[in-house]
Image (cartoon, rainbow, N blue to C red):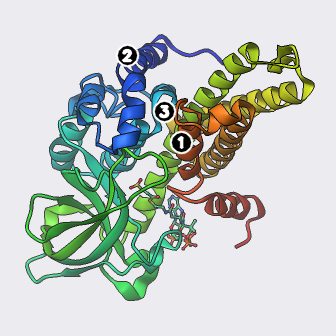
Amino acid sequence: MDFGYTEEQLMIQEVARRIAQEKIAPSAEGFDRSGEFPLDNIRLLGENGLMGIEVPGEYGGAGMDPVAYVLAMVEIAAADAAHSTIMSVNNSLFCNGILTHGTEEQKQAYVRPIAEGAEIGAFALTEPQSGSDATSMRCRAAKQADGSFLINGKKSWITSGPVAKYIVLFAMTEPDKGARGITAFLVDTARDGFHRGKTEPKLGIRASATCEIEFQDYVARAEDVLGDEGHGFKIAMGVLDAGRIGIASQAIGIARAAYEATLSYVRERKAFGQPIGAFQMTQAKIADMKCKLDASLLLTLRAAWLKGQGKRFTTEASVAKLTASEAAMWIAHQAVQIHAGMGYSKEMPIERYFRDAKITEIYEGTSEIQRLVIARHETGLR
Ligand SMILES: CC(C)(COP(=O)(O)OP(=O)(O)OC[C@H]1O[C@@H](n2cnc3c(N)ncnc32)[C@H](O)[C@@H]1OP(=O)(O)O)[C@@H](O)C(=O)NCCC(=O)NCCSC(=O)CCS(=O)O
């Protein structure tokens, strides 16, 4: 077993760290306050290979492995979670599925502009009435005599929905077949029949724009189908396996930022004549934070390594996401408590870490869904 990183992995980590510290961290508080989409920073990330880390060079990406993706995501998330949400959707939810299931034409047309940072991608599975229970979706794609599909329905909680050029969409083509009646499509938001709805006013990751989208007689051509008809659910689940590595990495970045800020604070802040870090109650919290952070990173690297080996990593991705997201929430909570009034104040980023951490326990499969995936695998029961 080798715990070292390759030169390539260290290089992308360094590129991500430099942009994170020079460009993203100084603007994070302002973007959080305004909720503005950080388009220039996202373009910069794309120009530096960070919007298509695992995308081969022939499709405009950096051609690196999933471990490199984890390392880069952690750096960006440590500076600002909202930026890493946009990065994660472009990399894992958008590019990944098309690379695995797309035709050569689809990869050139859809992956390249996203991987290069020229355009933004999105992933549309969730609906107002269906989140965890994805197979009960109502969005319909009715096949026409000429092989095209007429799409009607609503999708909600679409990260980057307000700005996305292209979307990977899941719709029911044969409702009576349940999971086997779902098909994936590649949508161009400039075409007729596509509409953007209300944006979500969110607790955290406020600079990552989220909205509802609606399809009213949107025509998807036969060549817009991603993968085989009826295979959409499996495509979505496979894409979410990869997405969960991204969210685990995001959670680690948020947790690391909260932990490092807390470490500095407990060394400097004095109470009863000594640094608060000298009190055993604080030391116990620091030790637990460190253990949860390290465990989260190792589990996430394990899932990423398996993915890089071409092995099945569904359970390991769920283990990583569940562990890292709950660790991030716990660590951010302790960070607020240790900083006390300063943790609750907007003068420090601690309250932002606390607000941003929460979403990692919700999107791309709630903690309850991760437990279900893990326990089904372990018991063989459902
Ligand atoms: C709850 C679930 C885990 C499972 O749902 P089901 O019980 O309805 O489905 P299954 O019977 O288990 O599977 C049906 C079918 O799919 C195949 N499958 C299942 N998992 C995988 C996988 N990981 N990879 C490949 N294939 C898979 C399975 O073998 C079956 O195939 P056969 O029919 O036997 O051939 C699931 O519904 C689930 O994970 N739900 C959570 C959904 C979720 O994460 N939603 C969030 C979406 S997106 C988001 O959060 C925001 C995105 S953004 O930021 O914009």
Q: Secondary structure at mark 1?
A: helix
Q: Which residue is mark 3?
A: 77
- In the rendered view, tell whether residue 171 sits above or below residue 199: below
Measure the C-alpha gap from mark 3 to mark 1: 13 Å
Closer to the chain start, of discs 1 and 2, is 2
Near-viewer residue (112 or 335): 335
Q: Quadrant of the N terminus?
A: top right
Circle 3 Cα neighbour tier, 10 Å, few/some/many (<14 / 14–19 / ≥20): many
- In the rendered view, tell whether residue 261 sits above or below residue 159: above
Measure the C-alpha gap from mark 1 to mark 2: 25 Å
Near-viewer residue (286 or 317): 286
Describe residue 376's horizontal placement relative to residue 178 as left or right.
right
Q: Secondary structure at mark 2?
A: helix
**What kind of residue is marked 1?**
Ile
Residue furthest to the bottom in view is 176
Q: Quadrant of the C terminus?
A: bottom right
Circle 1 Cα neighbour tier, 10 Å, few/some/many (<14 / 14–19 / ≥20): many
Residue furthest to the right in view is 280
**What kind of residue is marked 2?**
Glu
Q: Which residue is mark 2?
A: 22
Closer to the chain start, of discs 2 and 3, is 2
Residue furthest to the top in view is 7
* Residue 349 x, y percent position in the rendering: 53, 32
Closer to the chain start, of discs 3 and 1, is 3
For residue 245, the mark is 1
* Residue 237 x, y percent position in the rendering: 48, 60
Circle 2 Cα neighbour tier, 10 Å, few/some/many (<14 / 14–19 / ≥20): few
**What kind of residue is marked 3?**
Ala
Q: Residue at x 41, y 19 (%)?
A: 12
